[in-house]
Image: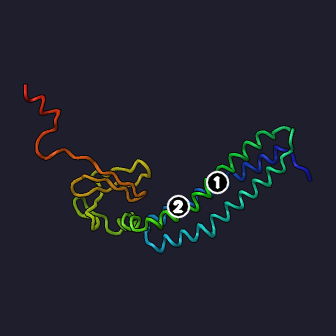
């Protein structure tokens, strides 16, 4: 049975939506693992990615290639079908790289993930001024959201460093010399 390009374009749209659902499912599972932060959870996430997400995305790729091969050249909607196929295959390549790389990156940095896991912090929420861990990190007061992932940032006692427990980002802040006022104010007082 020969199908027209419009029905094939509708099938490609279904595959695009399946990609988005798969991406969201992976993101939610990754967030749960980061909240837990344990090495066991990280290893389980790597195995789940290898046995669940990677085969699913490979199946999506096969299905998109099959549908694209059925597009009828020279008929209406063929250009749109080709463009949709290229876009979906680009998204599938991106997802494949994410499904392979993310679990391995998290395992490689497991010591930092374990240290900064929000689940670990949620077990004993620190009061402002109390140390949250051995490094002396505590939640900022007032809470400052991470611009990358939205988790609340942590800081050290001297407020010289910000650390995100969600994505692991760190930033060291420059401090002024304790010896006197900033340079811009010194020159103003000489007059």
The residue that appears at 63% across and 70% down in the rendered structure is 51
Place of residue 102 in the rendered image (x, y in percent of width and height, measured from the top left): 52, 61
Task: Compare marks 1 and 2 and give the one earlier in the sequence.
Answer: 1
* Residue 93: image tag: 1
* Residue 7: image tag: none
Place of residue 131 in the rendered image (x, y in percent of width and height, measured from the top left): 25, 64
Q: Is residue 128 left or right of residue 188?
A: right
In depth, the one of 101 and 155 nearer the eye is 101
**What separation in Å lies between label 1 and label 2 (alpha carbons)?**
14 Å
Classify 10 Å Cα crowding around label 1: few (below 14), some (14-19), many (20 and above).
Answer: some
Q: In this view, does 183 lie to the left or right of 70?
A: left
- Does 82 sit above or below residue 45? above
Place of residue 188 in the rendered image (x, y in percent of width and height, measured from the top left): 12, 28
- Does 89 sit above or below residue 104? above
- Does 43 sit above or below residue 24? below
Place of residue 98 in the rendered image (x, y in percent of width and height, measured from the top left): 57, 58
- The count of marks equals 2
Determine the residue located farthest toward the bottom in the rendered image. Answer: 40
The colour mode here is rainbow
- Circle 2 residue: 102
Determine the residue located farthest toward the top in the rendered image. Answer: 191
In depth, the one of 122 and 43 nearer the eye is 43
Label 1: which secondary element: helix
Label 2: which secondary element: helix
Q: In this view, does 55 lie to the left or right of 174?
A: right
The residue that appears at 84% across and 37% down in the rendered structure is 76
The residue that appears at 61% across and 53% down in the rendered structure is 94
- Does 183 sit above or below residue 59? above
Q: In this view, does 31 lie to the left or right of 55?
A: left
Instruction: Find residue 117 and report its image quarter.
Output: bottom left
Identify the image quadrant of the C terminus: top left
Classify 10 Å Cα crowding around label 2: few (below 14), some (14-19), many (20 and above).
Answer: some
């Amino acid at each position: 049975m020969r199908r027209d390009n419009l029905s094939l374009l509708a099938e490609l749209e279904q595959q695009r939506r399946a990609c988005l659902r798969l991406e969201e499912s992976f993101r939610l599972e990754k967030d749960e693992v980061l909240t837990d932060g344990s090495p066991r959870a990280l290893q389980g996430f790597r195995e789940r990615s290898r046995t669940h997400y990677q085969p699913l995305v490979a199946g999506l790729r096969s299905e998109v290639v099959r549908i694209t091969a059925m597009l009828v050249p020279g008929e209406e909607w063929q250009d749109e079908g080709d463009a949709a196929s290229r876009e979906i295959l680009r998204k599938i390549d991106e997802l494949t790289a994410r499904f392979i790389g993310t679990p391995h990156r998290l395992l490689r940095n497991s010591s930092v993930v374990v240290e900064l896991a929000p689940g670990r912090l949620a077990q004993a929420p620190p009061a402002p001024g109390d140390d949250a861990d051995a490094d002396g990190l505590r939640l900022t007061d007032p809470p400052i959201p991470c611009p990358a992932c939205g988790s609340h940032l942590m800081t050290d006692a001297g407020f010289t460093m910000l650390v995100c427990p969600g994505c692991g980002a760190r930033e060291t802040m420059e401090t002024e010399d304790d010896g006197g006022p900033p340079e811009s104010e010194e020159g103003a007082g000489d007059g």
